Amino acid sequence: MKSLDVITIGRSSVDLYGTQIGGRLEDMSSFNKYVGGSPTNISVGTARLGLKSALISRVGDEHMGRFIREQLVKEGVCVDGLVTDKDRLTALVILGIRDKEKFPLIFYRENCADMALCEDDIDPEFIARSACVTVTGTHLSHPRTEAAVLKALRLAKENGSRTALDIDYRPNLWGLAGHGEGEERFIASEKVTDALHRHLHLFDLIVGTEEEFHIAGGSTDTPEALCAVRKVSEAVLVCKRGPMGAVVFEDEIGASPDEGKSGPGFPIEVFNVLGAGDGFMSGLLRGWLKDESWETTLTLANACGAFAVSRHGCAPAYPSWEELQWFLDNGSCEHALRKDRKLEQIHWSTNRKGDWSNMKVFAFDHRAQLEDIAVKVGASENKIPEFKELCLKAAQQVRAGGGGYGILCDGRLGEEALFRATGSGLWIGRPVELPGSRPLELEIGPDLGSQLAEWPVEHVVKALCFCHPDDSAEMKARQEETILRLAHACRENNLEFLLEIIPSRVGQVDDVTTATIIRRFYDLGVYPDWWKLEPLKSDTGWQNVCDAIKKNDPWCRGIVVLGLDAPVEELSASFEVAGKYDLVKGFAVGRTIFAEAAEKWLGGTISDSEAVADMAAKFEVLGSVWERARVDKKEVA
């Protein structure tokens, strides 16, 4: 039994995608960063569709190379075959969307890392692990990379594995077009045709556009080109025909491309063709390697291609398996899929990365409370940022490399702590509300988009809203409008959103109060990644809350329980109730942990180490209490 479904081999780059749409690349002023390169995109696309995928390539020993490696790991792609090249830089591509016909791009590939791939990088044992080896045409353009590809194909054949070729013809990468002609898709070349022709017999599956079969077959007449390929290869040929879908030729080539087997197409608005072929290939490999019928396989491939052409970026546009199934079952009322709010929500929530199924969060995002303590003991408020660094040290001490630990910390008084925590593996939540405000006001200012654009993408936006079903219409309208704007800004900036609600500070609470508020926000179109809720008193209350969330968002990250400065004994009792519900992932507690240490440290009666030890001990106790509450947990919601 093979441990991998598919290994892709070839290009691996960082795509810098212009965020301005409709302008010249010369005028684009900001860019999003994605993984790129056809084989890398396919490895991500197939992993999202549930295949066990891996990549063989090279990246540089620098920030961009580490970015690719880390992103692939997050996507579930095996990187055992990804070599770090200490002498070369990771390839870069700068690209943009000019209009529906023009997609300018510049390849920065001079002596790049992935073109240094060699035979020594191909490990026979690694190749033996995979049921399929998929290569792309670019790595047949140079003797060194060609030798590496041929070795992998030979080993695959010896192991009884399938082989596939995505022709992926880029004239620029074969030296046939200038640096400023990266978007050029076809230039006839006998040299390229001969190079491809020599190896077509090695494949069980060959995929390309009509233009790509023109270069592989040496003719600009599509049936003639397909016949030329058939003369040297028994592979299944899949010819992509843009909005007309794709056709499959298992045996004879007819007089017209229409005579092959086909699957249903998806007529949608073309927003961005870049990477669409890699999305198509991902869906095709899913069906082909699972031995689905060609109608089903082409349906998967065409749908994945439809998603790709409707979204910004390449790999980030590809659907998850859950998203793809939902689309095939329900379709979309939007001609531009990126405008389908339901579909985009499923795309976002099913492609989030990171396992946060058991959360122990030290919350020291408090501002007003710590300022009050400083006033009480006669300390300067300028000492609060230093204390927050001690809070971080306590959290890191308890974590000690373990998973599921996090912090809540603000950027006004805790900026240095945030700097130190970012990239450390902690879950990081960061508040935006003006402390104590009701109606809700935001501390980050009115222009949410530009403010949040400065945040690291691993930071989770947290907003605390004091709200109640009995609020006046005016109060509801003001608070809901703020939350709607914030939720939209979070999504636009690829930041997760945690919504904290505390109705007990406003009015009486019963078993339906919190669930009623949650349903209202979903009705408005607000889909928090996380909910932070005060402890509920009964199983009925928790059941109502879990039902409300799961009915509206089955992919919600979950709930964390807040502390409200309760003593450990009271929190233990609330954890016992909450811990029975699978949707409750953990706790986010602050003053129970830091209040005593803050007063003593700010008052100058304990040292740094004593403050850290005190907070770490309390945090560790709460973690143990939570773990005990989960021991006998059964999924009741």
Image (spheres, grey):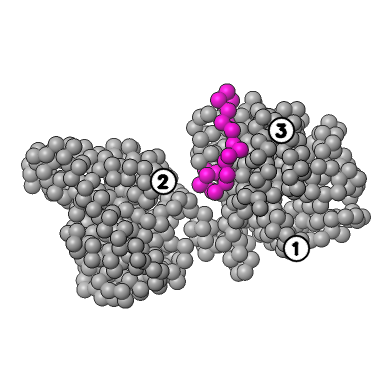
Marks 3 and 2, how far apart at CA: 37 Å
Give 75 or 41, whichever is nearer the viewer: 75
Q: Secondary structure at mark 3?
A: helix
The residue where tag 1 is placed is: 293
Residue 47 visible? The answer is yes
Task: Give the class, few, some or many, for how many residues have Cα within 10 Å of label 1's Cα (few <14, many ≥20).
Answer: few
Mark 2 vs mark 1: give the one in front: 1
Q: Are marks 3 and 2 in contact (CB under 8 Å)?
A: no
The residue where tag 2 is placed is: 458
Q: Are marks 2 and 1 in contact (CB under 8 Å)?
A: no
Dot placed on the residue nearer the N-terminal end, 2 or 1 = 1
Residue type at mark 1?
Ser
Mark 1 vs mark 3: give the one in front: 3
Q: What residue range appears in magenta?
A: 71-96
Pick the quarter of the image with the C terminus. bottom left
Residue type at mark 3?
Ala
Residue 148, disc: 3
Q: Are marks 1 and 3 in contact (CB under 8 Å)?
A: no
Give 627 or 369, whichever is nearer the viewer: 627
